[in-house]
Amino acid sequence: MSKRLLPAFLLGLLLLGGCWDEAQYKDITIVPVMGLTNGDKEGEVKAYFSYPTFEEETIKYAQSEGTGVSTRAAREDASHHTMEALDVSHLEVLMISSDMAKKNVYPEIDMFFRTPRNRITSYVAVVEGDMKQYFNPPGDFKSEVANYYPELLRTGVLYTYITVSTMENAAKLLFDETIDLTLPYLIIDENGLPALDGIALFSNNHFTGQTLRKQEAILAGMMKNKLGKYTRLSYEWKEKDSPITVQVIKVNRKLKISDERVKMKFDIDISVDEFPKNDLYKKQTRREAEKFLSAEIKKDFEKVLTTTQEAKSDVFGVGRKVHAFHQDLWKKGDWRETYSTLSIEIDVKVNLKRTSILD
């Protein structure tokens, strides 16, 4: 072969080579939503899948299920009942039953990190009750589960009902000794429809069985300083003569630790979205509103804190500062046990930055 043609020949060989992990779409079925729960036998995993099918030039979604000794084995079993192999590289939502989540959940998601082309930005959520009903809701469900759950969780992040709960973030926190994980908590409501009910509290690597409802979850997001685009709180003003709804603009949190006592101080900037009395242009009313909201939010923060301590779930990351700067307190014993009995004082100062166009 001519030396002039050799470079061209070698370049051609490179272009002919395929990707080492290439998967043809004609051979696989993309799965956008997947559910995991305990199987009938001890140590068995049961998996549910929602995947698209094409019928009469329209896209519809079908379900498949499988069981096995692991998540991957359950997927392989489910693939035996579909026309193509089930592929989770584009997974958008992974749901885990509350019973399964009460064990160490990492072994169930380990599979997703072993294949480089898998998406690890998928949402992860904990669900209450029978997993199967989340794929076939008993109510008048007018959407496809593959479209419904991703949008439900995106909306939850947008309105601070939940913080970003991707598979990547979940795995990091499961191995972090200084902070605990929260995941979205889904239920089937009284109408038989899937709904976001709040957040599930984890301790170490397992679900504690305790949750924070949506309003409490918003408050927890504020305490963690993890705000979505919209963060709103509503209260009854004084003697219930007028509602007041506020939009949280910014939260500044400071942690002070001394003599095994913790002080959490919050400076919260707000704007007023609703206040029918409409006299916030008066300085006295503005001061009263700031004082009232400071007291109400402080009470709510204390309730949320109590719940997390009862669950031994340090979702606010107090342990991070303790581990970094207070080794005597950190080495006192198991951090979750220490956190549950820790004396934590909360101080809240609300700053009314904007009233409304009428004021």
Image (cartoon, rainbow, N blue to C red):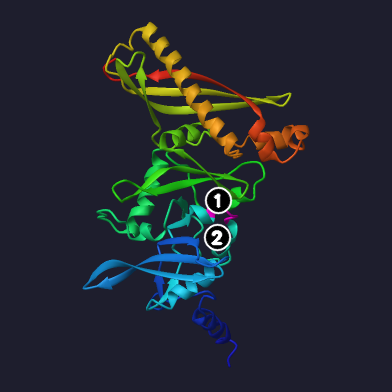
CA separation, marks 1 and 2? 10 Å
Is tag 1's residue or tag 2's residue first in the polypeptide sequence? Answer: 2
- Which quadrant of the rendered structure holds the N terminus? bottom right
Give the residue at mark 1.
170
Verify whether residue 51 appears in magenta: no
Residue drawn at (59%, 43%) of the image: 180
Q: Which mark is residue 332?
A: none
Q: Amino acid at mark 1?
A: Ala
Q: Position of residue 11 (x, y in %)?
A: 54, 80
According to the picture, the residue beneath numbered tag 2 turns out to be 109
Asked if labels 2 and 1 touch by Cβ distance under 8 angstroms, the answer is: yes
Q: Is residue 231 left or right of residue 67?
A: left
Q: Could you tell me what secondary structure mostly forms the magenta stretch?
A: loop
Q: Which residues are magenta?
A: 101-105
- 334 or 222: which is nearer to us? 334
Q: Position of residue 144 (x, y in %)?
A: 30, 59
Q: In the picture shown, does residue 145 fall above or below 153?
A: below
Measuring 48% from the left and 45% from the top, which residue is drawn there?
A: 164
In percent of the image, x 45 and y 34: which residue is there?
Answer: 216
